[in-house]
Amino acid sequence: MKILIIEDDEEVAAFVAAGLKERGHEAAIVANGRDGVERATGEDFDAIILDRMLPELDGLTVVALLRAEGVATPVLFLTNLSGIDDRVDGLEAGGDDYLVKPFAFEELMARLIALARRPMLGASPTVLSAGDLEMDLVARTVRRGGEEIDLQPREFRLLEFLLRNEGRLVTRKMLLEQVWEFLFDPQTNIVETHISRLRTKIDRGRGASLIHTIRGAGYLLRVPNPGL
Amino acid sequence: MSRIRVFRTTSFRLAAIYLALFTLSAGALGGFVYLSVRREILTEFDERIIEETDALQRTFAEEGRDGLAAILAARGSIGGALLYGLEAPDGKRLAGDLVATVSGGWTELKEDENNEAPEGSAEIIRALVTRLPDGSTLIVGDERRRANEALRGVLSAFGWAIGATIVLGLAGGLWLSRQFLRRVDAMRLAAQGIMAGDWSRRIPLTPIDDDLSALARTFNRLFGRIEKLLLANKHISADIAHDLRKPLASVLRRLEGARAQGADLEAVRSAVKAAIAEIENLLETFNALLRIGQVEAGARRAGFRPLDLAEVAREVVEAFQPAADDEGKTLALRLDDPLPILGDKELLTQMIANLIDNALRHTPQGVRVEVAGERVPSGVRLSVADDGPGVDSRELKVIFERFYRTDAARSAPGSGLGLSLVAAIADLHGLECSASDNHPGLRVTLTTADSNE
């Protein structure tokens, strides 16, 4: 992936760029909003990491300008503030995701990958599938190997999110935000217990496991390679 | 309270302006009434003379000049009656005292000085002179004074009324201003007391329920809020220092230990990992503090929308249900539908989640946690109650304070900020937050505060 980092905090920018390069991605850094707009309109990036508070042009203005210019590159906001107001403002201005500093690099990475591979609008499928698992978004039904599985609404949403991100790591935080709209991390193991229930329904006694736990990072829905 | 201040008060000024306007309009009305009454009195004065003249002319037609003279003579001796005069065509006075000075029509005569006005103030008499068919002259008149007296009566009644109005108005204005000043002084004193550091000072409320008491109540709420914020501020730095020192010291110890071990890479790695975990916890705590601070600052009220608190509670309970089941606990929901509230959905979600989190974390297996919501006259009431070990009655009041952890909870993970955030979010939404004994267990109740309190 090729990522543009618009961030005036050199330390954060270097930390993110180093992490990206370590994982085989390209990273470009600009330190102010004006240069950021110029760079983002002139080159193709898979995603943009954008700080909320920037010299020259602030993050909200940058994203608004980019969207007005017709640049659809996914934007992930970074901020020092833990306010939800900022999150709403950022998403309303045209941002796609939001992360509060300090963050774990894995969290940022998982979100960047999810953003960069987000399917183009207009081509949203009505059926999601992975191996012999099939989800009909219109009929709200789930089948594995042709057998219908009864899911609670929240389990359905959870599975839908995992399916949409098939093969990619999704973090606890991403699940809390996307499936429950919880912008905080409760002490109680909400995600774990729901995943465990979903696993019981989807995986137990139905052949290869689809839902995998990545310790300390999150979850992954993946069809095992039949060749292995 | 000095006299000058009384005159400067708003209520006195209002009273004075009102009084001036009232006096002016009363004066205008009085002038109008006076003119009307005057015209009426003068017309009546003339009419009485005209009617008498007509009657006397009829008498003359029936009884002749001598008959008329006799009647006039008789009437002249009755006090308070009109004044008369009858003259023969040759000018000889036949009856009465009045003398014709004109040949016909209205005239004004000076009353004979020897007659009735010994003090010298010659009375003006208005008279009607009529020529009778036989050439003799009939004069009927009355003292002008009588009309003037009636008018003066009207005028003085008016003067008294207006005078009394002004006096009463001024006295009333002064009294009102004094009342007003006394209450404003109470407010001023309370504010001065607070400025001097007596934060528990409040404006005494009067039994009168008016806009001034509403203002006083608002101020008292404001003072309460300031006091709370100040107290929180006072504690917060001490609390932060106290609660963050321990984990920081622990990080330091681990890292120093790692340095001492030197070459053992595995030990260094594990020490760094543990240090990172501690620091992440610290950051979580800071985030929680920041969040409480943001909520308490109240800026988020701008994004309030009408919501159904029952719906929010249902979603949160649904999210916690599997976790509660796995822990062998019952999570029950009992709700009135809907529970309308103006608020921030994300914050209310976190508020209820924190309460359920709290109830699930500090209770043993087999406990029952009930989330209940109902409508009450002031708005809504939401409670989260468990039948676990509960909280000591002395601690019920302080569990919402930052970093407060009961002895029993000290061993469980958590920052001691969960319920503080609940209190801050509740406060932002105008909900009163209280903890009570659920016999057994803990019950936290959030009730829409009565806006009049």
Image: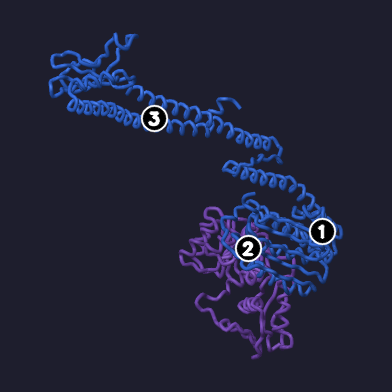
Chain colours: A purple, B blue
Disc on res. B391:
1
Mark 3–mark 1 distance (CA, rounded to whole Å) = 75 Å
Q: Which residue is mark 3?
A: B27
The earlier-in-sequence mark between 3 and 1 is 3
> In which quarter of the view is residue B108 placed?
top left
Q: Which residue is mark 2?
A: B346
Q: Camera-side residue: B244 or A154? A: A154
The earlier-in-sequence mark between 1 and 2 is 2
**Would you call the spot at circle 3 few (<14 residues within 10 Å), some (14-19), or many (20 or more)?**
some
Task: Pick the quarter of the image with the N terminus of chain B.
Answer: top right
Q: Residue at x 64, y 35 (%)?
A: B186
Mark 1 on the same chain as mark 2: yes
Residue B412: tell me if it is visible.
no
At label 1, the amino acid type is Val
Of badges 3 and 1, the one in the foreground is: 3
Of badges 1 and 2, the one in the foreground is: 1
Q: Where does the image place residue B97, in percent across and percent down from the top left?
A: 25, 15
Mark 1–mark 2 distance (CA, rounded to whole Å) = 28 Å
Disc on res. B24:
none
Q: Residue at x 30, y 19 (%)?
A: B143
Say if B41 sits above or below B257 in the image: above
**Would you call the spot at circle 1 few (<14 residues within 10 Å), some (14-19), or many (20 or more)?**
many
Say if B204 sits above or below B360 in the image: above
Say if A34 sits above or below A123 in the image: above
Numbered disc 3: what chain?
Answer: B
At label 3, the amino acid type is Gly
Label 3's element?
helix
Label 2's element?
helix
At label 2, the amino acid type is Glu
Q: Camera-side residue: A215 or B387? A: B387
> In which quarter of the view is residue B191 placed?
top right
The earlier-in-sequence mark between 2 and 3 is 3
